[in-house]
Image (cartoon, grey):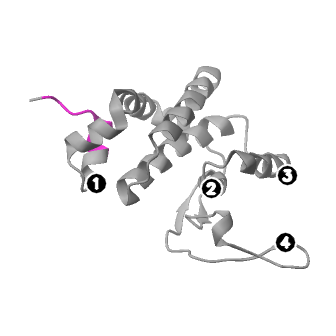
Amino acid sequence: MKVLSHSCLFVIHYSTKSSEEARLYLGQEVLALMDRTLKHGKQILGTSQGRPVLLHGDFCFGNLLFDPHTWRISGLIDPLDAEWGERDLDLVNLINGQVLHFELLNRYREAMDLGACFPLRYWFYQVWKWLFYYVRVRVACREWVLRCGRELEKAMDRYL
C-alpha cells in the first residue's frame, strides 16, 4: 500500500472523487507542487501584513454591481463564501484566471501597500484556491495550477 502525501489526502478528503481519479487528473507534477508548497506554507503565510479582514469569498466581476454613470463599484452580491482572512485572498478571485484582469490588480497594488512578499502569497493562494475549486465543483484547473505553481516557484526562490 502506498503512503499518501498530505496534498493527496487534502484532495481525497474534500472530494467525492476516488483517490485514484484525483491522482490521475492532477498528475504527479501537481501533487509534487502541492507537497512543496505545503512544506513552505508556514513561511509563506508568515509574510502576511496586517490583521484579518472580512472577505467576500468570491470577489469577482460577476459579483460586482456598478453605478452605470460613474462605473464605480456600488455593491456586491453572492456573499455565500464570506470569511475572515488576509485581504490578498479576495484579490485571487478578482483575477479568476483572466490575464486581462491583471491590470486591475496592478492598479490596486499601486494604491495599497501589500508588502514586498505579496507575489509569494498571491501565487500560493492561487494554487490552493484553484485546487479547492477542483474538489468543490470539479473545475478543470490542472494547467492553470501548474502555471501558478511555476510563478510560485519563482517567488519562493526570490523571497524565501
Q: Which residue is mark 4?
A: 72
- Disc 2 marks a residue whose amino acid type is Arg
Packing grade of label 4 (10 A; few <14, some 14-19, many >=20) is: few
Q: Which residue is mark 1?
A: 15
Answer left or right for 10 relative to 80: left
x then y, percent, for residue 99: 69, 45
Mark 3 and mark 2: span between their CA atoms?
18 Å
Give the camera-side residue of 154 and 86: 154
- Disc 3 marks a residue whose amino acid type is Ala
Q: Magenta residues?
A: 2-10
Mark 4 and mark 1: span between their CA atoms?
38 Å
Answer left or right for 43 relative to 111: left
Which mark lies nearer to you, 2 or 4?
4
Answer left or right for 22 relative to 3: right
Name the residue: 58% across, 39% down.
Answer: 123
Q: Which residue is mark 2?
A: 51
- Disc 4 marks a residue whose amino acid type is Arg
> Quarter of the image containing the N terminus?
top left
Q: Which residue is mark 3?
A: 111
Which mark lies nearer to you, 3 or 1?
1
Name the residue: 43% across, 53% down.
Answer: 139
Labels 3 and 4: the sequence-earlier one: 4
Q: Is residue 20 magenta?
A: no
